[in-house]
Image (spheres, rainbow, N blue to C red):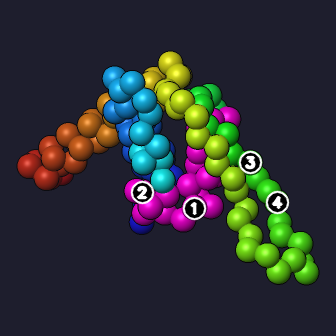
Amino acid sequence: MKTTFGIMNRILKGIDSQMDSDFFDASVLTAEKYGITKNRFARILKMLSDARYIEGVEVIDEGEPDEFDETPYTRFKIIIGEVFLTFKGMEFLAQNTVTAQTFSMLKKIREIAPL
């Protein structure tokens, strides 16, 4: 199962990989790329934007559909502009990368020298 923090980390890494490009490649920001639903993806992008980890993304929550509305319904609308990591987003990414590396190293040590 994919954790929300793991997906957030992957999204931030994907955005970071675009920092040297002249134009942002929006294919980095699709639910399919991360193997999650569009609703989950929209909610994660909203969290990242609200927390000021990224800029250039707007997520609009259309709310619940009308009970008698027969038209196709999409809960979230995602508007992608020139997306970039903020300094806060870079700090989050760096901190979580170091934490993941430390956890991996401790796991390997435990395998070599069990308690």
- Comes first in the chain, label 3 or label 1: 1
Number of residues whose C-alpha sits closer than 10 Å to that of mark 4, classed few (under 14), some (14–19) or many (20 or more)? few
Amino acid at pointer 3: Ile
- Contact check, label 1 and label 2, Cβ < 8 Å: no
Q: Is residue 62 above or below residue 9?
A: below
Quadrant location of residue 28?
top left
- Comes first in the chain, label 1 or label 4: 1
Residue hosting label 3? 60
Give residue 67's position: percent from left, percent from top.
Answer: 89, 78
Of the pair 88 and 34, the residue shown nearer to us: 34
Q: Residue at x 32, y 40 (%)?
A: 100
Q: Is residue 46 visible?
A: no
Number of residues whose C-alpha sits closer than 10 Å to that of mark 1, classed few (under 14), some (14–19) or many (20 or more)? some
Q: Which residues are magenta?
A: 31-50
Quadrant location of residue 17?
top left
Q: Which element carries disc 2, helix, strand or loop? A: helix
Q: Is residue 53 above or below residue 61?
A: above
Number of residues whose C-alpha sits closer than 10 Å to that of mark 2, classed few (under 14), some (14–19) or many (20 or more)? some
Residue hosting label 2? 34
Q: Measure the C-alpha gap from mark 1 to mark 4.
A: 15 Å
Residue hosting label 1? 38
Amino acid at pointer 4: Gly
